[in-house]
Image: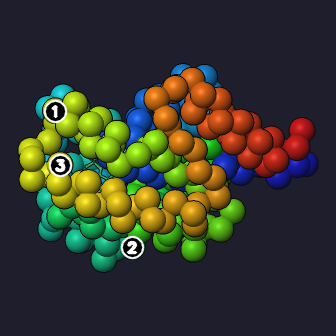
């Protein structure tokens, strides 16, 4: 009997406002049933419209620290003053069932995943320029000026890490073009993992 084929773990990073969410949504629409999103835990307060258990598991810092101590996270990191982490058992059980998993995480967490699971596939989504990113972030209207500045500073640091990812995709305004590249990566990597 053939052993169960494992799912592929995709790690997605890119600065706030680069369009990761939209690209992710397109991938999930096209490959529904094959790929699951891992909902992270965070100490950040929910934004308007965010749903607990769907966008994030919103937890207190105390609860988050307890989970770190229990070794419940595949990775965790601090970003813009808040803690974020990926629940380990959920991700592992999906991969064991042959379901691909996508993590949308920042660069420190992505480096931890690459270290512990080198077979994972990392993709960095780049903006065409920092100016364009600032424009998009402001247009989103979800953040205060202070938070926008904090996120822009973080973006510069994040972009500096793009080269350490397996793939870099520029979302330069033509979403379809960026999606075609992402789709190619997904198909190449999943077919490599499932050679019939
Ligand atoms: P936001 O607050 O805008 O939802 O997320 C801020 C940053 O944290 C984004 O870059 C997002 O991808 C990242 N992030 C979300 N969940 C996790 C996680 O579980 N681990 C890590 N390391 N980063 C995360």
* Above or below 25: residue 167: below
Which scheme is used to colour this image of the protein? rainbow
Q: From the image, tell me which residue sits under label 3.
A: 148
Q: Nearer the viewer, residue 168 or 193?
A: 168
Tell me how far mark 3 sits from mark 2, CA to CA: 32 Å
Q: Nearer the viewer, residue 64 or 146?
A: 146
Q: Residue at x 35, y 49 (%)?
A: 130
Q: Are marks 1 and 3 in contact (CB under 8 Å)?
A: no
Q: Residue at x 46, y 42 (%)?
A: 128
Tell me how far mark 2 sits from mark 1, CA to CA: 36 Å
**At numbered mark 2, what does the secondary structure look like: helix, strand or loop?**
loop
Numbered badge on residue 71: 2
Q: How many numbered callouts? A: 3
* Above or below 68: residue 178: above
Q: Position of residue 56 (x, y in %)?
A: 29, 44
Image quadrant in which you'd find residue 28: top right
Whether residue 85 is visible, yes or no, is: no
Q: Position of residue 111 (x, y in %)?
A: 50, 69
Q: Residue at x 48, y 47 (%)?
A: 126
Q: Residues within 10 Å of mark 2 (few under 14, many from 20)?
A: few
Numbered badge on residue 141: 1
Numbered badge on residue 42: none
Q: Residues within 10 Å of mark 3 (few under 14, many from 20)?
A: some
Q: Any atom of ligand 1 within 8 Å of the CB at mark 3?
A: no
For this view, does 127 lie left or right of residue 4?
left
* Above or below 102: residue 177: above
Along the polypeptide, which appears first: circle 3 or circle 2?
Answer: 2
Q: Any atom of ligand 1 within 8 Å of the CB at mark 2?
A: no
Along the polypeptide, which appears first: circle 2 or circle 1?
Answer: 2
Q: Farthest residue toward the bottom? A: 69
């Amino acid at each position: 009997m053939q052993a169960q084929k494992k799912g592929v773990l995709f790690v997605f990073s890119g600065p706030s406002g680069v369009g990761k969410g939209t690209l992710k949504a397109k991938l999930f629409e096209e490959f529904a049933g094959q790929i699951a999103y891992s909902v992270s835990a965070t100490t950040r307060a929910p934004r308007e419209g965010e749903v607990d258990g769907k966008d994030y598991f919103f937890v207190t810092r105390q609860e988050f620290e307890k989970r770190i101590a229990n070794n419940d996270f595949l990775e965790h990191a601090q970003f813009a003053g808040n803690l974020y982490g990926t629940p380990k058992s959920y991700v592992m059980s999906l991969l064991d069932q042959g379901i691909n998993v996508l993590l949308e995480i920042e660069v420190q967490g992505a480096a931890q995943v690459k270290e512990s699971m080198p077979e994972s596939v990392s993709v960095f989504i780049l903006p065409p320029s920092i100016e364009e990113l600032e424009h998009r972030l402001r247009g989103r209207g979800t953040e205060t000026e202070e938070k926008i500045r904090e996120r822009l500073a973080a973006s510069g640091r994040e972009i500096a890490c793009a080269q350490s990812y397996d793939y870099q995709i520029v979302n330069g305004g033509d979403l379809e073009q960026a999606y075609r590249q992402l789709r190619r990566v997904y198909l190449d990597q999943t077919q490599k993992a499932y050679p019939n």
